[in-house]
Image (tube, helix red, strand yellow):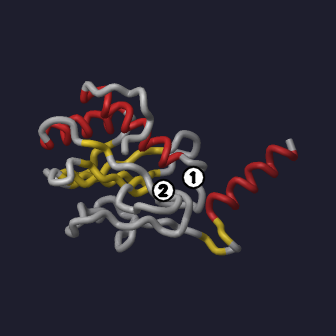
Amino acid sequence: MRRMAAFFILFAQLLFFDNGKAQIARPQGQTMNTEEYKIPAARHLDPCPDTPNCVNSEQRFGRASIAPFQVHGPPAVSWHILLRAIQEQGGQIESVNDMFLHATFRTGIFRFVDDLTCRLDPVSGVIHLRSSSRIGYFDFGTNRRRAERIRRTYRTLSGVDNSGSSEQ
């Protein structure tokens, strides 16, 4: 019983604190009120914070880096396939237009809300993504695993072979 209590205390410290300071990972320039979480006006996704609970395909280097999704076929069709893949993986589409989308996911145990933002880049033939935790410091790789699950579902729905994990 003591070990279990110690584990949960350590888990809470890792999740919510860094050097005694509470950490709340927020999308840069955004609030945590989902009604106020708007599709970005900029042409790029917000960079990840310096916490290990975010991945971003527009960040080419570092621990936050992840490959973008490749567009297979017409961009508009790929975009709709991505929406379906997100929903099949448990995502709730909060807002979407023809170039950006914002979806939310709930984590398994504590039901925390994580954000997924995607940007279609038809010129480059890719869909960029940013998946991040709203609160906490460390996510135990949850956002990266979620992005890769969405990628596999997207590739399957697109009719593309899933033998490789990450697209380059």
Point out the residue furthest to the front here. Answer: 168
Residue drawn at x 34%, y 49% is: 68
Name the residue beneath numbered marker 1. Answer: 139
The residue wearing badge 2 is 133
Picture residue at 41% right of the left edge, 53% below the top: 131
- Between discs 2 and 1, the one toward the N terminus: 2
Answer few, some or many: residues within 10 Å of disc 2's Cα (few below 14, many 20 plus, some between 14 and 19). Answer: many
* Residue 13, horizontal then vertical, whole percent: 70, 61
Distance between the alpha carbons at the discs numbered 2 and 1: 7 Å
Residue at 53% x, 57% y is 53
Taking the view exactly as shown, the residue that stands out farthest to the right is: 2
Residue 70: percent from left, percent from top: 27, 42
Circle 1: residue type: Asp
Left/right of residue 4 with respect to residue 15 in the rendered view = right
Question: Which amino acid, by three-letter code, is at mark 2?
Answer: Ser
Q: Is residue 132 above or below residue 146?
A: below
Q: Could you tell me residue 79's position as x and y percent?
A: 19, 42
The local secondary structure at tag 1 comes to loop
Q: Is residue 146 left or right of residue 157?
A: right
Image quadrant where one finds the N terminus: top right
Quarter of the image where one finds residue 47: bottom left
How many marks on residues? Answer: 2
Q: Is residue 162 above or below residue 128?
A: above
Instruction: Specify whether 11 is left or right of 38.
Output: right
